[in-house]
Image (tube, rainbow, N blue to C red):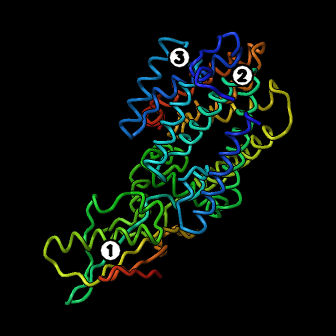
Amino acid sequence: MITLRKLLEARAAEALGGAWLPVRMTAVLLLVDGSKVWYVWSTITMLTCLGLVFHSFLRRPAFWLIIALCIATWILRLWPLVDNHHYLAGYWSLAILLALCVPDPPASLAVSARWLLALVFLWAALWKGVFSPDFRDGRFFTVRLMSDDRFEQRAVLLSGLSLEEVRANRAFLSQEEQDDSRAMTSLNTTPRFRFWVDVITWFVLAFEAALALLFLLPLGRGDPLRHVGLMLFCVGTFAFAPVWTFGWLILLLGLAMVPGEHRTLRVCYVTVWSLVSFAAYFPWDHITTLIM
Amino acid sequence: LIPYIPPILLCLVAFLQLFLVRAHDLTPWRGGGFGMFSTNDDESRLIEVWVTDAQGERPTVVTLEQWPTPVTALPSETRLAALGRRVAEAERARGNEVRSVRVAAWRSEFTAPAMRPERRLIREVVVDLDEHSRSR
């Protein structure tokens, strides 16, 4: 039975063991990943600032109860437009709340983290490999790389087309009206681009399916295979995809699974965590332009 | 059982999202099912609105206040009908006669190898003056 006193009581940092680090890092993530609902954003910012200054707040179940309720409010207020990783942040906040109410918080968080990761990758792989035919045949990445202006320079690099040709492709895909003399009847691509689209399509699908399997299999908490796989996926994906806070979150979940005595693995997670945020702001497009 | 509560919640939401995608055309990118980056059918769908008065049917421009983005992410019959009613109210407020409003939601599909974008109708709803609506 969870009493009000238990909800307000701070657990000792020692009781959290290896889970104390990912709990603090979750507060950092919530602080930087703002909501579009002003009262949710204000409340989360205020609470996480308090928690990062006065650490005992982060060890109180009531703190995470309010955070979980804020995220639930955010999701319901903007439903269905909220990004998927905000749902995951809500589940993770709930997992921290529940873990702080049981005798062994690190074990509880490790179980929640493992199954959340397994299910996130399983659903992501199912959507790509089973439910979405336009992913499997390469149409998704063909259209996304050519139509999203954030990937403009990468499309130039992968296709060998000029920037003007990529922009003409974007206009074609977005059904913008074109001068009749320049009207395109089909997308302008190259064998090189089609090769890279196939590589990216199958690499992403295979990697996500493999990670789902690794987290579903009953391997040890510190098994390096799943952790190295997760870190490689994050470096390869979130350095380029415009959702690096999703990368931060799944790295946190991975870190929460690592027992406290596995120092090397924990250092690796924190390093990759920093790398992902660094890479997210790195001027890739500028570098690509210089190379070209 | 306690540590399994968040993963169970994730599964429930994901199954609900799958149902909404299949039954009500929610975009797979949204709704908590982790279908982002899996399909070109994201929330950038096209919504068209036509107003019928004594002279016949004419297309109308929908303002941002009448057209919240969740309509494009989940163009269910209820949401399209609600948009149609808001348009009818706005037209009447401007002194225009309105007999019915027709609202249609479209998605873009790309057919290989040309990848020429083609519109596919997701759902169309007609809101009559007597507030009864019918969908196609």
> Please, is residue A60 above or below residue A30 in the view?
above
Q: Secondary structure at mark 3?
A: helix
The secondary element bearing badge 1 is classed as strand
State the residue at coordinates (39%, 40%). Answer: A36
| Quarter holding residue A214 | top right
Chain under callout 3: A
Q: x, y (%) of residue B135? A: 45, 80
Is B54 situated above or below A289?
below
What amino acid type is highlighted by mark number 3?
Answer: Phe
Q: CA distance from mark 3 to mark 1?
A: 52 Å
* Circle number at residue A105: 2
Label 3 to label 2: alpha-carbon separation: 16 Å
- Expressed as whole percent of the image width and height from the top left, the position of residue A248 reads 58, 30
According to the image, label 3 marks what residue?
A57
Discs 3 and 1 carry the same chain letter: no
For the N terminus of chain B, the quadrant is: top right
Q: Nearer the viewer, residue A201 or A37?
A: A37
- Asked which quadrant contains residue A198, the reply is bottom right
Q: Amino acid at mark 2?
A: Pro
Question: SS class of the residue under badge 2?
Answer: helix
In this view of the protein, which residue sits in the foreground, B82 or B58? B82
| Residue name at image x 58 percent, y 49 percent | B32
Residues at marks 1 and 2, CA–CA distance in whole angstroms:
54 Å
Chain for mark 1?
B
